[in-house]
Image (cartoon, rainbow, N blue to C red):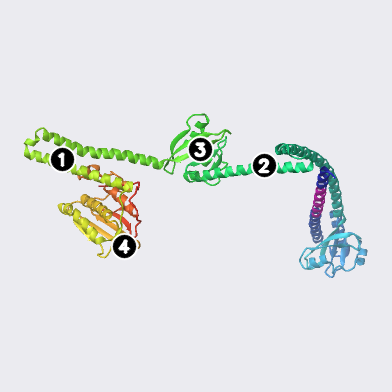
Amino acid sequence: MGNRSKLMLVTLGFVAVVDVLVGVYLERELRASLEADMWAELERHARSAAEMLVLSGATDPASVDDVADRAGRASSARISIVDRIGDVVGDSEFAVGELGSLGAHDDRPEIEAAFTGHVGQSMRFSESIGEEMLYVAVALHEPSRPWAVRAALPIGRMQATVGNMRRAIAVAGVISLVVAALLASLVSKLIATTLRSVVTTAQAVAGPRTRTGEEGVRQSLSQMAAELEKALGLLAAERNRFEAVLQTMDQAVLSLDERHRVRTVNPAARRLLNLRHDVEGQTLLEAVRIPALKELVEEAEIGRSKSREFEIPGVGRQVEARATMQGNGGLVVVIIDVTEIRRLERIRRDFVANVSHELRTPISVIRANTETLLSGGLDEPERARQFVEAVLRHAERLGRLVSDLLDISRIEAGRYPLVPTRLNVADTVDHVLDSVEVDATAKDVDLEVDIDDDLTVSADRKALEQILINLVGNAVKYTGEHGQVTVTAQANEDHVRFEVIDDGAGIDPSHRERIFERFYRVDPGRSRDMGGTGLGLSIVKHLVDAMGGQVGVETRSPHGSIFWFIVPNEPVARSASDHDGARGRS
């Protein structure tokens, strides 16, 4: 038997089994549906007959039988009326004189159920009619006439309908077998043609050494399958490499089709653009509501701008996006977060501008005073002294600025080594206060210390003193005459919190976000008059970060400021390194 014959037999066998199963299922469902309809129909007929009996008021056998006859003719069903003891007092199929021959019906299941308040149902062979019947009985519920009204129909009508359907299913099954045989023949022919083509191709792939015959075909197919498996393996490996690169890229990548629907999104894009996990298949504007990105894609399609820089709305991130057309009409959009780069560029520009300005002022004063002295000012001793003192002040200011710049440079370059040692906090603070006592005395500023004598901290002495000198020096500088500056320190679990509290004018909340930036001044004119470089708080921020701590400023009630910093008691042993975002008031 050939393969085509086998395929045809299998197909016909399958269709035959399906036909039989469908036929059995349909017959069962139809029988159940017809039976349910007949039960419902019989209940309606029984209740209608009961209503007719109530309306007629019949009580004698003749009138009761007449009601049963009329109800039977109207419903085409057999209507029987049975009293409480089981005697038939009316029947549409029998005359009044024949009712006694029907026997007692009190043992009929439907009658018993009706008299107990239910709708009685049963199916059985009727001795009097000689047919299989369906019975439904309901009670009349009248004390004077405790009767049950029963409706019955022969089951043959249902069986005839089921038989008709069975014959229709059989005819349909034969037709389906014939159609299946034709289709199987056609399909087997197509498959055979395709297989011959596959075999020819396989033999061509396998090369001239392939044997002919059935063994040769198997060898050719086996070799072709191996080649296909190898090619699929290479494609899968390439896809996995591509997925690995895409998933680990820091840049956001969006792949779009020719209709601007999203095909691929990498994790970086989901984070940067705050995308949901089900954006694939959506249009670009549905997934990412950024008009600038949509405009970039449209311009890239017509060969115009392929890159654009814009800010993501609601996120505050500056990005640079580049769109590239693909050969299939789609696009790949790569988005780079340049927020930090732009911030560093701004800091660099501001730093250069501020340093230039800070250097220009003292140099200009020194040059002007020197020129005045050389132009004859030396001949006037009193004025010459003033000019020389001005030169000295601005030279010292220039020296402090250069010193602070060198400190920041060393910290950022990691050349400011931290050597943590166990320090007594009170002694360290006293040493710092000695350094600023002259300035405090000149303004009659009271210096207070609230520190436990036994409190110690593990920190770099030089760094800690420089932090405190900058903070306390600033507090004295910006506190009015007869004011007060208080230094406190308290151990909290694994760190020590320092606070420098003054009762000066305080700092407006709008300045607190930038107070530790280099050269940032709350009041530039006043700061320069007081000789500040604008780098003190920036140095504080860098040193505290280098020791693994935190620094901040709070408002003191009713006025004044609280500069605080936290130093871990077990600090990270490392050199001071670059900590961007330093802020300053000095």
Q: CA distance from mark 4 to mark 1?
A: 46 Å
- What is the magenta range? 13-28
According to the image, label 1 marks what residue? Answer: 391
Residue 409: image location, x then y, percent: 30, 45
Residue 158: image location, x then y, percent: 85, 54
**Going from the N terminus, do you reach mark 1 or mark 2 first?**
2
**Going from the N terminus, do you reach mark 4 or mark 2 first?**
2
Q: Closer to the observer: label 1 or label 2?
A: 2
**Going from the N terminus, do you reach mark 3 or mark 2 first?**
2
Residue 20: image location, x then y, percent: 82, 51
Query: Relative to the observer, which residue lies in front, 291 or 211?
Result: 211
Q: Looking at the image, do the residues carrying marks 1 and 2 touch, with CB atoms under 8 Å apart?
A: no
Element type where label 1 sits in the image? helix
Residue 572: image location, x then y, percent: 35, 56
Identified by mark 4, the residue type is Ala
Identified by mark 2, the residue type is Glu
According to the image, label 2 marks what residue? Answer: 227
